[in-house]
Image: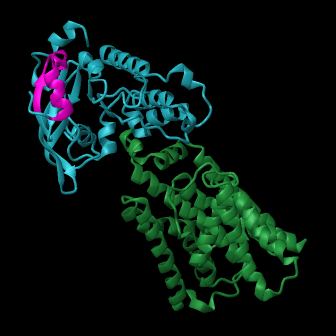
Chain colours: A green, B cyan
Amino acid sequence: MRYLCHVLVMINIYAVLASSLNLAAGYAGLLSLCHAAFYGLGAYATTLLIMKVGLGFIPALVLAMLLAATLSLVIAVPSLRLRGDYFVLATLGFQVIVFSILYNWTGLTRGPFGITKIPAPRVFGLEVIGIFPYFLFSGALALASLGAIWLLVNSPFGRLLRAVRDDEVAALALGKNAPRVKTTAFAISAAFAAVPGALFAGYVRYIDPTSFMLAEAIFVLSIVVIGGAGNFLGPVAGAVLLVVLPEALRFLHIPDSVAANLRQITYGLLLVILMRLRPKGLLGNYEFD
Amino acid sequence: MSSTDARTLTDSVPSDAFVLRAEDLNAGYGKKQVLRGVSLQVRKGEVVALIGPNGAGKSTLLKAIAGLVRVSCGQIFLNGRDLTALPTHLRARQGLAYFMQGGAIFPSLRAKDHIALSSWVTRSARLHGRKTTPAWPLPEFLADRREPAGLFSGGQRHALALATVLAKPPALLLCDEPSAGLAPAATRELLQRLERLVRDLHVPVLCWVEQRIADILPLADRAILLRDGRTLAETNEPRRWLSADVLAEITFGDAAK
């Protein structure tokens, strides 16, 4: 039961993270390699605001989301006027920079030692302690985030987003401010990527920069691609699959030294097979160029 | 358009009746200059055909007016308003409709979404009383289609693209080779539509044509012959240009004016 709850909490975390990336990559066509950075910013900002400033979980989370959205503009404003490939490179640079800051600003983040003894989240005067309450808590927050993203992609703004992704020049010719649409979408996406960060920090109660490296960004992107970019439920399906799959390997009683490598090999194989058979992902309706 | 009274109207009009006025446009791609000082005017309710050999700059001229190609020198006015410094989307909001070659659609959106997208304006624009009645309603055979437009046939895409561009009544319609890739019957239908648009709504049209010159020239009120990025000749009786020597000039770029 505890184990099942743990798996479900991880699914909640990755479903929100992948859905936030889907908003940028799937709906707006903005391939981002820095969502692990926003995820880490969410984790660190929420934790530090709770521990050093003494804010409650929800106000800390809201501020962390605003911080991630603001920092996303640093990449989006200069690079979204350029071609798509430059944007990908800019996100890659941002990912590496954020990791370096988390790793080296030891005065604030304690660098490689990480932050220990993170208090359990307090919401409305209640402390979320224990694995089952945490599953309910993360589930509620995940549902709220996914609901907000659903409303957004099904609004006129979501329609505009897909139009800009499909044909940016045609959207411009219809009087749509395409660069601003993409910048806004990227900022909202970054804000929602901060939510799973806060959930992760409150769950594990310990964070260090290695959880938010480029490999994690690529992992999240593979959740989106495998699940199906541009489809609302695609990243959720991808998160279920990619979180459950390595857990299933656990029951094969493989020695620890092999297991980690096997996990990577499985992801790789899955990607190759899927790209061959279903290039748009499990549920997707948009294929990257 | 083909009626004579429309043509006599356009002959002696005051200069403020120009919907579009482009002066001494110079534009190009990187170091390659394509337009070398093109000037032209489009008056209310007229159809102007742009013709010329390959590489004359017809497409570039329309792109420069729409703001998709940067103008290095010269000015563009729409209803007396200087558009030269505005980016593409703000020019579109001033009423410049641009029908791209082959008709641009958004493959993942349904037909109705296109119209909703095109006529969706921000609240501030709505407060200023901008009209959103469609100038060109979505054809019935498309309105009920529920699949994404990426699955439409070429002709359906074309019709959808035109309805999308015209979802808001434009001040001027720019057409980039409107008949490209269309069957003869579909071309005829398209031309009839454009003719009705001009006659009923007095929307002027500036279009460049390469294929089916013989079909389109008679419909135009004026024609402009472009070569090497310059206007070579202009006529108020485009029908007369259907003669062999002008067509040779257009096709081969000979000095056979």
How far from the left and from the top, in percent, is residue B177? Answer: 32, 31
Q: Residue at x 60, y 44 (%)?
A: A154
How far from the left and from the top, in percent, is residue B64? Answer: 24, 43
Q: Tell me the quarter of the image containing the N terminus of chain A.
A: bottom right
Residue B71 appears left or right of A190: left
Asked if one can make out residue B44 in the rendered structure from this viewpoint, the answer is yes
Total marks in image? 0
- Residue B247 found in image quarter: top left
Residue B77 appears left or right of A239: left
Q: Decide which of B121, B224 is in the foreground and name it.
A: B224
How far from the left and from the top, in percent, is residue B115? Answer: 49, 31
Q: Decide which of A268, A97 is in the foreground and name it.
A: A268
Residue B134 appears left or right of A278: left
How far from the left and from the top, in percent, is residue A265? Answer: 71, 75
- Residue B207 found in image quarter: top left
- Tell me which segment is drawn in magenta: B232-253
Q: Decide which of A15, A30 is in the foreground and name it.
A: A30
- Residue B62 found in image quarter: top left
Q: Residue at x 50, y 84 (%)?
A: A100
Q: Residue at x 20, y 18 (%)?
A: B221
Asked if one can make out residue A73 in the rendered structure from this viewpoint, the answer is no
Q: Residue furthest right?
A: A1
Does A75 lie within the magenta span? Answer: no
Main secondary structure type of the part rendered in magenta: helix
Q: Is residue B126 above or below residue A229?
A: above
Does B238 lie within the magenta span? Answer: yes
Residue A88 appears left or right of A272: left
